[in-house]
Image (cartoon, rainbow, N blue to C red):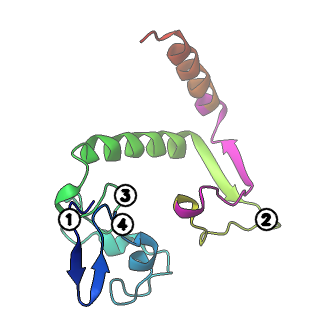
């Protein structure tokens, strides 16, 4: 937030102005990423995997990046790997998933259906045991 009036390239900004970045436009800019709309996760395997600023701004930009980014990233990693270990996920052809919505901006997301099935009865048992254990936890 600006603490005093400011001017930049002819634009005037009064004190109290709050700036944000347009992460959607940056993420889909061909100047920033080759073929930005293509699902191509390996594009981020470029030696910067340990950087908080590695190809997305989920934790904020620049020096104001969230100090807990690594904890957040690892929690997401653990959750996703557990889900992928135990379940198969399939798109339902009659209800394609629209990956171009902007829930961060519109505050709602497009609903979609997906078929989720346990990989085996052993995987289903593992999920049941883990759910029972976590329901007993007291914080």
Residue 114: say if magenta. Answer: yes
In the picture of the structure, the residue carrying the numbered disc 1 is 4
User: Residue at left 45%, top 9%?
Assistant: 138
Task: Report helix, strand or loop for mark 2.
Answer: loop
Marks 3/1: CA distance? 28 Å
Residue 88, x across and y down, in percent: 63, 49
Q: Which residues are magenta?
A: 105-123
The earlier-in-sequence mark between 3 and 2 is 3
- Please, what secondary structure does the residue beneath circle 4 have? loop
Mark positioned earlier in the residue sequence (3 or 1): 1
Image point 22% across, 81% down: which residue? 7
Ranked by sequence position, the earlier of labels 1 and 4 is 1
Name the side, left or right, on which 58 lies relative to 129.
Answer: left
Q: Is residue 58 left or right of residue 85?
A: left
- Secondary structure of the residue carrying tag 1 is loop
For marks 3 and 2, give the CA distance: 28 Å
Q: Residues within 10 Å of mark 3 (few under 14, many from 20)?
A: some
Q: Which of pointers 4 and 2 lies earlier in the amino acid sequence? A: 4
Q: In the rendered image, which residue does mark 3 sit on?
A: 58
Within 10 Å of the Cα at label 2, are there few (<14), some (14-19), or many (20+) other Cα atoms?
A: few
Identify the residue position indicated by label 4 in the image: 20
């Amino acid at each position: 937030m600006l603490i005093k009036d400011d001017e930049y390239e002819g634009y005037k900004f009064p004190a109290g102005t709050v700036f944000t970045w347009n992460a959607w436009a940056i993420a889909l800019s061909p100047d920033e990423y080759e073929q930005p709309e293509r699902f191509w996760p390996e594009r981020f395997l470029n030696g910067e995997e340990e950087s908080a600023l590695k190809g997305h701004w989920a934790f904020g930009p620049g020096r104001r990046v969230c100090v807990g980014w690594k904890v957040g990233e690892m929690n997401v990693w653990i959750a996703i790997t557990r889900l992928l270990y135990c379940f198969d996920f399939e798109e339902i052809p009659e209800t394609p998933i629209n990956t171009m919505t902007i829930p961060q901006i519109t505050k709602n997301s497009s609903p979609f259906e997906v078929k989720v099935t346990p990989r085996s009865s052993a995987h289903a048992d593992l999920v049941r045991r883990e759910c029972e254990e976590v329901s007993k936890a007291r914080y």
